């Protein structure tokens, strides 16, 4: 297992380098411009100066290599410095700066991580927690009314666009009923029970929208996986041993069914870090997803490049995690 | 309007300012929402309105404009003029006097050195200062004493109020930014996010593109202001949500620039939690007519002066296009109270406003048809007019935006009624307004027959704005498509007027020249102005003191805001 | 039994089929699974060579390798005088009509999305230029030959029972008039009453078309019925090869003896008094075969030499080959004498040639 | 075997139906048999003859839907198993009735250790705590001949070979000292040498433990070696029942006879040609009102198409369901 | 599944296309049947509907704006007085066409890559890395680049609507084939070990015919399921693109565009949101149900039950 993991990590290096190049080309060649959002009253000479100050005049290759060096050498050094108070990074080690805010992209990401993790992460966890029992019961009682309703709800979950459900929830619960805030307060800090309650209230709607979507998908996987296992011979063996249905289903079948589902869940984790572009926009959560979309709209190449590359790393990493998990959970699988 | 007059007006407004004279910080927190989130607090590093206005809570200029476009002294004692001797007769230098006793938020005194530094900062090599145009022609800034600043220009400046005036060019603290000149500017993240200022508030926490927390400046010059102890400045989302949060759910006190359909806005107001405020500036939604040929077959030469447009060079066609448009209806549908039909590309200030073209306000489809008939454009079997094998077929582009798309649909229908085939295209704003020479979709490249967007100018002086239509401003591949004459309109007579204005100092004469230029553009129908767009913002019923200002930052008088119980 | 001078149709020499095992960080080759390890045998024209052994012994791999369905590791395969062990794709394709295969699982070996006519017609599509009606005629002819109703031509495999499916598979194998057919456990997946039908069909076809079979099976009783000669495989190697009656009557290799004794006889009278040689333990992994004789770990008659030296596969008595050190000793002791002493008493009723 | 002893299991007129999309399939039709204490009852038949379904029906192991036990009585321990509640059935399964299934590869749960799966019935039925169960598990592993039991209990099923896995299955089935062991083709998936090992083990265990066994198989050789008494199933019903030697020596039903003739022998004269039973076994969409074997039967006559023969005694402890008397070469008079 | 329905003794059954079996099983899945019926209804509505309901969807009747449902405008009108029913119908044409075309493209690419990777061992590694790469690529910037690079060429070749249609279909297609490729690859890997592939090899069938004759038909069921999910996914993605302002031109209604445009009017004219919202949701839902039913119907294990 260890050698397998190491080998996969080694393969990941060239893959990721190639991905970083592709992302760089895509992002750089995109016809957006960091000065596009400036008022038209700013004349074009000034815009040209601004672009020059951002280093846009350098050749593509130079910019790519600089970014690589910044990402893989300078940034880690700076982060270590920040974390441990060392001074490994010298002054000429320019960090990756966002063109829009002129601040280090890493800082922006660190700043946005909490709300994204809170909202998207919670919704993912809740989604999974809802999905599993629904999937289990749907499979066990295949074609029962519960299964039918569960199927309908989960399908509805991913067939309605989140920009629609989000606005709908806001109109109902913020405007009409006034129960929850329509704008997420990213500065809110949980210090006591009351403030925790405030946090819960502002999270309910975005979490609900996303959790429904996540639960919909995972419950389908869970159901399919349970169905696969319910007809296996070992289930008959378990019944022949006189075990109760609960033990048969929740111990024997579930344990086997969880193997593929756990990997699916692991594969979904990068999307948590990626944020939810539309939902964040609708509820003003201003997390990673909103950072990305604003950066794209603002032609902020370093931010887009860095963010998308981090997503790529996470995707590759969690692909590996999923495979390793599979190996750990299923004693039959041995990687070498 | 004479400047002296303007001064009086400003004083009058200030006198009417809120009577709730409580002590500083007694009114708790005010929540402001901007649906575009500020990405920096340094206005020199970003020209975006959202950034400028956020920064205006902290940073202040020597003088700024009030809600009527009058200049009012801010950090300066008075507005220097030729009359009061502040501006030299040859119009090459202007002398500002700082108010005595001004302090930065950290308690250190504000001196003329800070003012001079602000100029140095913006003009330093490699800094990419977004406001460097404000400092055009400045050759030197002298600081004879702590409170006096003399700005010297290389040429005669009939309008010397560029540097240090308005939200675009405030004074920054020399001590804080000393190490941030030129290429080092972006590295001073802390300074850029938390600049020391003289304004009523000071930054506690800045989260780029998200939220800003500010608190009252302890060293603000008026000891009773601001009434609010803190400001929460939230950014992001969309105009609908911002309006909703003020007008319907009362989560916020002030929402900026609610570009919404009139009935949507009216519905929100009907909830009764707040009201909208609107004001008009110089922003005009217009259709630009391409005088050059954008057809792709021309390769490199498309949309350049080498290739005149096959039919838009015919004035009859341009005029007919204009006549077919019902500007009243456009306003009604797209802007409601936040817009008014206009026939001028220079709609304000009052003194510059021409009345010569008001005929355009009435839609006249029949006359437009007749005009085209006369010019020899006859309808073909498909209803599209043609002459000598040239069909009146247009590509009409604009940026992606719900109101603009409605306008496109309406105008398309009108134009098709007069026999002009219209194809619509909308382009993402970041691409359309982006200057990327590699993109075919920028408004500057103008690879379309007509395009629509809005433009205005900073402050109240139209000189540089009207200079946009100089022949030499025509974008071309040679200039990397930079240049402001998007229409590719070129007229010697127009160029002469621009040159004349550059050396004319008297306000009335300048106004006449500007009007003449405006009328020239209008009567040649190279620009079809549609709507004079106002600014609509909303505030809650509990927020007092809001005076909407379209000539400067909307938050210009935030120090005077207070809570109505 | 074999009168005319017989022609060798298939000659297999030193056939090796190793599947590499990769591992480690760089996925280096760590070793190999020796599925078929130096196997040699000949098949005479018109005969049936039975190839028996337990699952995992490499008999199926051997059968497929002989037809070059794999790229073999080493060795020579001559079919009808032509070497195909190292033949390229084109040559191999040209030789395919001569050699065909019938598969174990009639369900799995028929494409579920093709009709019977298309399945049987596929070889014709590939190798002949028959017109449509000609092809259909040939398909009907083949269906008749294997006892399938012509009306079934447009049906799909899942509509048939196992035995009928196997008939389809046989018809497909016959389509190009092959000389040599590898039957890879053709009856293993069938019910007892159907097995007999298929085996009889195979026998009928053999006599009708003069076919040569390599009949791979784990069912020793059935092999006894159908095969002319029998080869026994254990862990990738042929351990014994002999004419049918010699093998069943007087097995020489301890493994063959154990195998035969393990087969239950469907007669309670015989079965209750039969001596079963119960082998201990399981077959070792072909990735890691034992040193010396492959069978040494389980052999009831194992000697020291067996754990050191791999016994040579050689002709102990004419026509009877075995790879066992027991016969080395016997040969040195009583050179030239037939090793008939090994026959167990209960086997005496067997007809011995 | 003493005829007088009360049977440990007595099945009467069992009928099981599968509901499928295309209609009902009558898999078990009026099956009756009994099992004496300590005997090994062999059940022979081809796939689809209903032998497995019968045994599954006894103890409620068939998934319902689509299966449905329509009628019958299954007497075990003085109760009718078809009438008792699921909970009581569960208490019997694995405790008093053990099961061994065909494919040891898939019948063990791949993600639990063998020890866990072995301890499960012990803890459930015998209320043992973990250490007691472990001790017993080690004993059981020794019993079925798996060496190094202590260590191997921590292994997963895939780490065992096929034969060893089947031994584990047997150990699980025997865990609670059942009175009846139902083995459904337990050696079919195994190689002959391994099959021989398992058969040997089985004989040994029976001697030691003395439980009654139902052994389902299609391999007549296995039956010949291990069974005391045999029932032959065809088309969802029992067509013949006899002590093993009697059955092989004197088969009465044409199907049994044909079956015995189709299989080649390892010993004795080699038949030049195998006997075959032409045609295919039936799948019944309704309870048969005629003899299900008649289409393949060489002796079938008009009555066979009109009536479904009942089992009639044809010898001591031997009965068959056929209208044809093979000895007299004439229709039987029933 | 053992030998299935053999009546009494001999199998005498009419030759039966296996698709009929699939259809039989499909019919038993009520949800799938209703889904299919609804989808057919939608297809008919958007293809034949505009022939019956002949109001031009782009015609602006400014006096009749913001009307509720009436006889003249059963679904009401929008803020410019365009007939909502007409816009729904023509919008549906685009949305469904985008769904079907993007699905087809992603299936073709996914199947192609999946089959090649599964069938040819040597291509496996590189093609799977390619799949990873695409999985890790950011959609939005990619979209902008593609629009920049190809829009003009496509526009001159196919006209403005055709051009953007091809573009959107292309973008959705090439960013959503990866799942299909993975599933197909897995199935092909398993299929390669099946005996009938070996049987074809023993006949000497060359690789390309092996793929078309034996591999492709047998990976059909996962592909069909991917297909239904693909349609749903493409319709949703198109609406998300509209939300982000990257979709079709504004005068070219699609359901996504209509829904997005009307969310602002959610409070005043809720019906305006309901129509496109319902249309998208129900279509996606029906297609999903169809997929579910199809998966069951194509699975012989389930079909046999």
Image (cartoon, grey):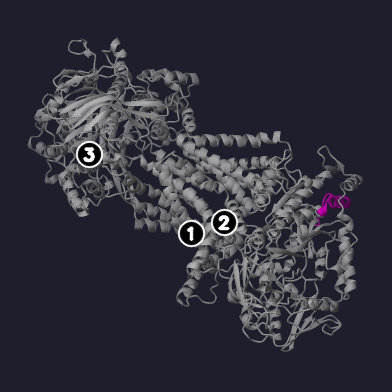
Question: Along the polypeptide, which appears first: circle 2 or circle 1?
Answer: 1
Discs 1 and 3 share one subunit: no
Which of pointers 1 and 3 indicates the residue nearer the eye? Answer: 3
CA distance separating discs 1 and 3: 48 Å
The residue indicated by pointer 2 is A279
CA distance separating discs 2 and 3: 56 Å
Q: Which label sits on residue A121?
A: 1
Q: Which label sits on residue D98?
A: 3
Residue D90 drawn at (x, y percent): 27, 41
Q: How many residues crowd around disc 1 within 10 Å: few (fewer than 14), some, or many (20 or more)?
A: many
The answer to whether the residues at label 2 and label 1 have Cβ atoms under 8 Å apart is no
Of helix, strand and loop, which one carries label 3? strand
Residue B298 visible here? no
Q: Which label sits on residue E46?
A: none
Of helix, strand and loop, which one carries label 2? helix
Discs 2 and 1 share one subunit: yes
Q: How many residues crowd around disc 3 within 10 Å: few (fewer than 14), some, or many (20 or more)?
A: many
Looking at the rendering, the stretch of residues picked out in magenta corresponds to B305-328
């Amino acid at each position: 297992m260890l050698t397998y993991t190491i080998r996969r990590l080694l393969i990941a290096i060239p893959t990721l380098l190639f991905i970083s190049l592709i992302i760089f080309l895509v992002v750089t060649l995109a016809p957006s411009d960091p000065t596009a959002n400036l008022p038209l009253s700013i004349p074009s000479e000034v815009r040209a100066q601004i672009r020059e100050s951002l280093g846009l005049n350098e050749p593509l290759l130079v910019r790519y290599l600089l970014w690589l060096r910044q990402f893989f050498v300078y940034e880690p050094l700076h982060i270590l410095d920040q974390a441990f108070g060392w001074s490994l990074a010298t002054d000429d080690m320019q960090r990756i700066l966002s063109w829009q805010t002129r601040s280090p992209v890493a800082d922006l990401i660190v700043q946005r991580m909490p709300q994204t993790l809170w909202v998207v992460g919670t919704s993912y966890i809740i989604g999974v927690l809802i999905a599993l029992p629904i999937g289990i019961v749907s499979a066990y009682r295949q074609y029962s009314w519960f299964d039918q309703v569960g199927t309908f709800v989960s399908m509805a979950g991913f067939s309605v666009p989140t920009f629609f459900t989000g606005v709908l929830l806001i109109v109902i619960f913020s405007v009409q009923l006034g129960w929850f805030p329509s704008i997420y307060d990213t500065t809110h800090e949980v210090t006591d029970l009351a403030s925790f309650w405030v946090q819960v209230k502002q999270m309910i709607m975005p979490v609900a929208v996303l959790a429904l979507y996540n639960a919909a998908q995972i419950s389908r996987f869970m159901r399919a996986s349970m169905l696969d296992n319910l007809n296996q011979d070992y289930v008959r063996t378990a019944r022949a041993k006189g075990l109760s249905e609960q033990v048969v289903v929740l111990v024997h079948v579930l344990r086997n069914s969880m193997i593929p589902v756990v990997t699916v869940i692991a594969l979904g984790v990068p999307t948590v870090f990626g944020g939810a572009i539309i939902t964040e926009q609708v509820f003003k959560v201003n997390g990673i997803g909103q950072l990305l979309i604003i950066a794209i709209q603002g032609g902020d190449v370093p931010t887009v490049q860095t963010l998308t590359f981090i997503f790529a790393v996470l995707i590759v990493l969690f692909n590996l995690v999923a495979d390793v998990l599979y190996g750990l959970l299923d004693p039959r699988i041995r990687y070498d | 309007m004479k400047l002296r007059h303007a001064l009086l007006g400003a004083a009058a407004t200030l006198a009417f300012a809120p009577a709730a004279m409580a002590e500083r910080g007694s009114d708790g927190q005010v929540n402001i929402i901007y649906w575009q989130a500020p990405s920096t607090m340094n206005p020199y590093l970003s020209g975006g309105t959202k950034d400028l206005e956020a920064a205006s809570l902290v940073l202040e200029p020597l003088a700024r404009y009030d809600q009527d476009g009058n200049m009012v002294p801010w950090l300066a004692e008075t507005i220097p003029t030729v009359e009061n001797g502040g501006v030299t007769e040859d119009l090459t230098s202007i002398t500002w006097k700082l108010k005595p006793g001004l302090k930065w938020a950290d308690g250190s005194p504000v001196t003329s050195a800070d003012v001079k530094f602000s100029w140095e900062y913006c003009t330093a090599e490699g800094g990419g200062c977004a406001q460097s145009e404000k400092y055009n022609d400045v050759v030197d800034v002298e600081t004879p004493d702590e409170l006096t600043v003399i700005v010297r220009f290389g040429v005669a400046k009939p309008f010397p109020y560029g540097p240090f005036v308005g939200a675009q060019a405030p004074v920054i603290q020399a001590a804080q930014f000393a190490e941030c000149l030129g290429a080092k500017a972006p590295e001073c993240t802390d300074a850029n996010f938390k600049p020391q200022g003289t304004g009523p508030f000071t930054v506690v926490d800045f989260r780029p593109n998200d939220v800003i927390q500010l608190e009252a400046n302890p060293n603000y010059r008026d000891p009773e202001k601001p009434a609010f102890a803190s400001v929460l400045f939230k950014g992001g989302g969309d105009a609908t949500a911002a309006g909703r949060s003020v007008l319907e759910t009362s989560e916020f006190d002030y929402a900026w620039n609610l570009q919404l359909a009139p009935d949507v806005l009216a519905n929100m107001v009907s909830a009764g939690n707040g009201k909208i405020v609107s004001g008009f500036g110089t922003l005009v939604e217009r259709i630009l007519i391409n005088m050059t040929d954008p057809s792709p077959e021309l390769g490199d030469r498309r949309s350049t002066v080498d290739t005149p447009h096959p039919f838009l060079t015919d004035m009859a066609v341009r005029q007919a296009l204009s006549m077919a448009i019902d500007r009243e209806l456009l306003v009604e549908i797209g802007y409601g109270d936040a817009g008014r039909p206009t026939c001028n590309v220079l709609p304000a200030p009052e003194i510059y406003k021409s009345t010569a073209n008001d005929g355009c306000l009435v839609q006249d489809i029949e006359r437009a048809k007749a005009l085209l008939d006369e010019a020899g454009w006859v309808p073909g079997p498909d209803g599209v007019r043609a002459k000598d094998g040239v069909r009146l077929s247009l590509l009409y582009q604009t940026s992606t935006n719900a109101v603009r798309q409605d306008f496109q649909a309406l105008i398309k229908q009108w134009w098709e009624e007069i026999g002009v085939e219209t194809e619509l295209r909308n382009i993402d704003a970041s691409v359309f307004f982006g200057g990327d020479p590699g993109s075919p979709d920028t408004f500057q490249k103008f690879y379309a027959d007509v395009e629509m967007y809005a433009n205005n100018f900073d402050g109240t002086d139209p000189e540089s704005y009207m200079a946009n239509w100089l022949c030499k401003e025509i974008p071309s591949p040679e200039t990397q498509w930079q240049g402001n004459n998007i229409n590719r309109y070129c007229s010697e007579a127009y160029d002469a007027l621009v040159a004349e204005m550059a050396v004319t100092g008297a306000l009335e004469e300048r106004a006449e020249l500007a009007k003449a230029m405006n009328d020239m553009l209008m009567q040649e129908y190279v620009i079809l102005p549609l709507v004079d767009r106002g600014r609509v913002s909303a505030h809650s019923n509990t927020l007092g003191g809001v005076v909407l200002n379209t000539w400067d930052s909307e938050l210009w008088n935030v120090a005077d805001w207070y809570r109505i119980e | 039994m074999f009168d005319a001078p017989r022609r060798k149709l298939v000659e297999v020499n030193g056939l090796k089929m190793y599947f590499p095992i990769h591992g480690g960080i760089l996925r280096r080759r760590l070793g190999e699974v020796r599925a078929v390890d130096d196997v040699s045998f000949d098949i005479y024209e018109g005969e049936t060579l039975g190839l028996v052994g337990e699952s995992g012994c490499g008999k199926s791999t051997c059968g497929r390798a002989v037809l070059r369905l794999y790229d073999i590791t080493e060795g020579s395969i001559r079919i009808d005088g032509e070497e195909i062990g190292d033949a390229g794709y084109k040559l191999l394709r040209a030789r395919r009509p001569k050699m065909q295969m019938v598969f174990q699982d009639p369900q799995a070996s028929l494409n579920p999305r093709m009709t019977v006519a298309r399945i049987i017609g596929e070889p014709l599509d590939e190798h002949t230029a028959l017109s449509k009606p000609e092809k259909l005629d040939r398909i009907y002819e083949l269906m008749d030959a294997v006892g399938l109703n012509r009306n079934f031509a447009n049906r799909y495999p899942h509509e048939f029972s196992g035995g009928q499916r196997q008939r389809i598979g046989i018809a497909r194998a016959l389509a190009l008039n092959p000389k040599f057919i590898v039957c890879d456990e053709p009856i293993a997946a069938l019910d007892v009453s159907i097995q007999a039908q298929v085996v009889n069909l195979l026998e009928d076809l053999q006599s009708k078309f003069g076919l040569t079979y390599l009949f791979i099976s784990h069912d020793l009783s059935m092999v006894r019925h159908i095969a002319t000669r029998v080869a026994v495989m254990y862990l990738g190697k042929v351990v014994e090869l002999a004419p049918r009656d010699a093998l069943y009557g007087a097995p020489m290799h301890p493994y063959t003896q154990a195998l035969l004794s393990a087969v239950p006889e469907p007669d309670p009278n015989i079965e209750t008094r039969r001596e079963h040689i119960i082998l201990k333990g399981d077959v070792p992994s072909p990735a890691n075969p034992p040193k010396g004789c492959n069978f040494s770990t389980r052999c009831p008659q194992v000697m020291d030499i067996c754990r050191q030296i791999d016994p040579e596969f050689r002709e102990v008595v004419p026509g009877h080959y075995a790879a066992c050190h027991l016969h080395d000793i016997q040969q040195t002791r009583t050179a030239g004498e037939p090793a008939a002493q090994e026959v167990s008493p209960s086997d005496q009723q067997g007809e011995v040639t | 075997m003493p005829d007088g002893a009360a049977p440990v299991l007595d099945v009467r007129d069992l009928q099981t139906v599968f509901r499928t999309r295309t209609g009902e399939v009558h898999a078990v039709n009026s099956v009756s048999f009994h099992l004496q204490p300590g005997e090994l009852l062999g059940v022979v038949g081809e796939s689809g003859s209903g032998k497995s379904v019968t045994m599954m029906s006894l103890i409620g192991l068939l998934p319902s839907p689509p299966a449905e036990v329509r009628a019958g009585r299954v007497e075990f321990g003085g109760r009718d198993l078809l009438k008792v509640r699921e909970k009581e059935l569960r208490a019997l399964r694995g405790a008093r009735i053990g099961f061994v299934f065909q494919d040891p590869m898939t019948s063990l749960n791949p993600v639990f250790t063998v020890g866990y799966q072995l301890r499960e019935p012990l803890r459930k039925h015998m209320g043992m705590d973990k250490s007691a169960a472990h001790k017993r598990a080690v004993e059981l592993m020794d019993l079925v001949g798996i060496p190094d039991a202590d260590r191997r209990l921590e292994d997963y099923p895939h780490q065992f070979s096929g034969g060893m896995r089947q031994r584990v299955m047997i150990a699980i089935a025997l865990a609670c000292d059942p009175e009846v062991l139902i083995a459904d083709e337990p050696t079919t998936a195994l190689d002959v040498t391994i099959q021989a090992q398992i058969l040997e083990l089985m004989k040994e265990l029976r001697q030691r433990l003395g439980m009654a066994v139902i052994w389902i198989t299609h391999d007549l050789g296995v039956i010949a070696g291990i069974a005391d008494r045999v029932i032959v199933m065809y088309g969802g019903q029992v067509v013949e029942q006899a002590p093993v030697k009697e059955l092989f020596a004197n088969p009465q039903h044409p199907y049994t006879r044909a079956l015995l003739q189709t299989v080649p022998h390892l010993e004795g004269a080699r038949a030049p040609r195998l006997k075959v039973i032409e045609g295919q076994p039936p799948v019944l969409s309704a309870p048969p009102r005629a003899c299900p074997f008649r289409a393949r039967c060489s002796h079938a006559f008009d009555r066979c198409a009109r009536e479904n023969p009942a089992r009639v005694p044809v010898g001591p402890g031997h009965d068959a369901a056929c209208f044809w008397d093979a000895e007299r070469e004439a229709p039987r008079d029933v | 599944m053992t030998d299935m329905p053999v009546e009494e003794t001999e199998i005498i059954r009419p030759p039966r296309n296996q698709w009929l079996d699939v259809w039989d099983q499909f019919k038993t899945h009520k949800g799938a049947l209703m889904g299919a019926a609804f989808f057919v209804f939608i297809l008919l509505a958007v293809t034949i509907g505009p022939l019956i309901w002949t109001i031009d969807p782009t015609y602006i009747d400014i006096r009749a704006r913001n009307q509720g449902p009436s006889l003249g405008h059963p679904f009401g009108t929008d803020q410019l007085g365009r007939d909502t029913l007409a816009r729904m119908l023509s919008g549906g044409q685009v949305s469904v066409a985008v769904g079907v075309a993007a699905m087809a493209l992603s299936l073709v690419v996914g199947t192609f890559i999946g089959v090649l990777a599964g069938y040819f061992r040597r291509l496996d590694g590189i093609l799977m890395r390619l799949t990873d790469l695409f999985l890790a690529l950011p959609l939005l910037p990619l979209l902008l680049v593609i629009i920049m690079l190809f829009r003009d060429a496509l526009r001159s070749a196919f006209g403005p609507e055709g051009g953007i249609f091809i573009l959107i279909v292309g973008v959705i297609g090439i960013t959503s084939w990866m799942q299909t490729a993975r599933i197909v690859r897995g199935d092909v890997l398993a299929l390669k070990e099946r005996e009938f592939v070996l049987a074809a090899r023993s006949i000497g069938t060359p690789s390309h015919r092996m793929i078309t004759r034996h591999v492709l038909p047998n990976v059909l069921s996962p592909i069909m399921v991917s297909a239904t999910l693909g349609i749903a996914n493409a319709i949703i993605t198109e609406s998300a693109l509209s939300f982000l302002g990257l979709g079709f031109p504004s005068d070219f209604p699609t359901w996504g565009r209509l829904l997005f445009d009307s969310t602002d009017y959610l409070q005043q004219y809720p019906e305006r949101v309901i129509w496109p919202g319902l249309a998208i949701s129900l279509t996606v839902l029906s297609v999903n149900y169809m997929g579910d039913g199809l998966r069951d119907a194509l699975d012989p294990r389930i079909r046999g039950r």
